[in-house]
Amino acid sequence: MPERLARSSDPALCLEVWLGPIEGMRHVEPVPASKDAVVRIGRRRADEKRGLENQFVLAEGEGVSSFHAELRCSGGKLFLKDLKSTNGTFARNKPVTGEIPIESGEIFLLSTTPVRAELVVDPRTEVSATESPAEDPAVSSTLKKMLSLAREAARRRGEAFVDSRHLAEAVLRSGDAIVEKGFARAKLSREEALADLWRGGLFHGGTAWLQRFLSAPVQARTIPDSPALSPRARRVMSAAAIRLAAYPSTEAESLAPVFVLAALLAAGEGPVGGWLSENGVRAETPTPPRRSAGRKTVAAAVAPSKEGRLSRIDEETVVAPVARREKAAAEAARAEEEGAPATALLSKPASTAAHPTVPAFSTTGDSVLDQRARAIALELEETATLYRFSTPEDRRTVMKAVVNRSLAAIAPENRTRILSQIRVQFPVVGAPPPAEADEVPRLLQRIQELEQRLERLKAEKAEASSPERLPAGAVPWKALLAERPPEPPATEGADLPALHALLTFARHMERFLLGLVQGVTMPGDATMSFRLPGHRYTLEGLLSGLEQGKPVDPKTVSEYLRELERWQVAILAAHHESARLWFDKLWKRASPAAIEASTAKGGTWKIRGEATEWWSRYKETVKGLTPDVVQDQVLQTTFRLAQEEFDKLSKRRQS
């Protein structure tokens, strides 16, 4: 599809994730003149049983359903439809019900994942932008400091990803003089820019309604040491790395902040790039050093267009080959100085360990094998998505079984090509190169720091378990955990009966909440040893540990109690909505209108005599029955039963 679009002058529908963990992920769909173009969006690639397939797959989208929404282009107009998703689709701050028209360039929400839809006249640049970056920013030594600052910004907000907002914060916190000068001309200090960046400066006009969905941090359960870059953040860092390749290594690292800022400004279709441009921020990049005559320099290849943007086609068709040739020439010159022939390095083919290639000339049989390999790769991707929450060992075992089962039906002489094509889809990353000599001192220092940290942790653990940390008898746990309240102490300042009553209430409330959770998660399975899913303990276990003098992590206790509160709110909300759900799911089938409609088709059931009068009274009685009426009656009954049960418990307690 990308090659066909690159040669076509027809318009195309471009979908792009606007912000968040998968910011910059794109899909380009051609718009034929004779029929409508339909793009289905969802978390899964396909459902073979139902015969459904998503064209735009958001496997990592927060709250995105398997088949979430559908976008249709007809006659140059766009129409958005929700496919009965779990968390809903929103446009212009309203939930989407049925099919609604939207404008080109408008942003809509799939749960909390914002997607921008736009009709483009020339789709060639959009197609090139969906491909992988020409350079990997993770291997660029000149961008290590900027990557570290961006990931620190993500960890500070409790997020497990890096998008263009974190890159903008990294640029602001770099302390670069050129960057500060660019913001000063826009009459923005660093503190003002940071506050505006995270407090709604990106949302205004037609995007103001998105602020309440996207301003809050996307809290993650576990934050990795190196949060992953979003696709747009990777493209921005890749563009900066390409342009920094034109400078000596001694200067490139200090120039990294201003070139990252320039790349953010070049990506003006994103929220951060637009925010920077609207505030008048500029990035004055220095002139690159001149190279030898007769060769086109990287600086010339990445010259901005009249609008101040970099052409994506130039980045991928001109910049990358020039950068690779310059790198090869530098290696050849270094080898020649060491005595090795330069031609050996210049003619050496690129490594194919990570991305194996296929022969230049393919036969019909090879094409059939390649199609089979792509089918296996799609099945592997679907399997990896289904088992993304399982352990790595289980996921590896299932995927290995898929490959073995698929290869069993293929002739042995054809399996090599099949495996090589699968490796193209799932490249095997080779071992990192050995550390150079100048890295040894730094590594030794890091090892020493880790050893010292380990010693401190051992000392803290020993101190926590020592009698001095928690002396025996400091807290009268036995009296507090006894069934009967203790006698009032003679000492002043202590109120053991009150503490005993508080602890008893907490234990009883926890047992009640655990019973509710058990009733909705495992109905009919009665047990007194039920624990909250995902936790290995209860308050009884924690209090018993305190009684024995064992240290207890306050963070662990706080997380457990918050989990109990969330379950309580969720169960009460579900109880409140159960009447409406009953009416929608059951009453529409058992109502008089539904019964008469179902029997009228067959014509075999009729009411005669007294039954006719009874049936008429019944229909008159339930004539005004609606979800709100049912819900109100259920809540009134619930209140009456709760009041009776409360009175019974009160009388029992008094007696």
Image (tube, helix red, strand yellow):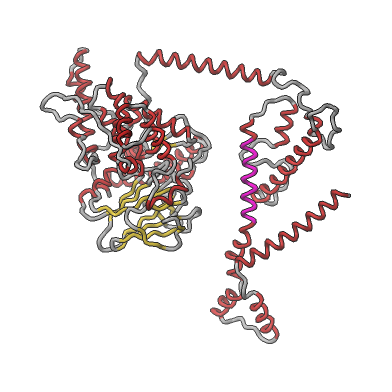
Whether residue 501 can be seen here: yes
Residue 16, above or below 547? below
Q: Residue furthest front?
A: 187
Q: Is residue 652 left or right of residue 337?
A: right
> How many numbered marks does the figure carry?
0
Q: Quadrant of residue 439?
A: top left
x and y, in percent, of residue 16 in the image: 35, 48
For image coordinates 21% across by 32% down, the residue present is 321
x and y, in percent, of residue 31 in the image: 28, 57
Q: Is residue 293 left or right of residue 540?
A: left
What residue span does the magenta drawing correspond to? Answer: 558-575
x and y, in percent, of residue 299 in the image: 20, 31
Q: Residue furthest right?
A: 655
Front residue (pair 35, 215)? 215
Front residue (pair 384, 264)? 264
Q: Is residue 534 left or right of residue 495?
A: left
For image coordinates 18% across by 17% down, the residue present is 341
Residue 10, above or below 386? below
- Magenta-drawn stretch contains 517: no
- Magenta-drawn stretch contains 571: yes
What type of secondary structure mainly makes up the magenta span?
A: helix
Q: Quadrant of residue 583?
A: bottom right
Q: Residue furthest bottom?
A: 609
Front residue (pair 627, 595)? 627
x and y, in percent, of residue 110 in the image: 44, 51
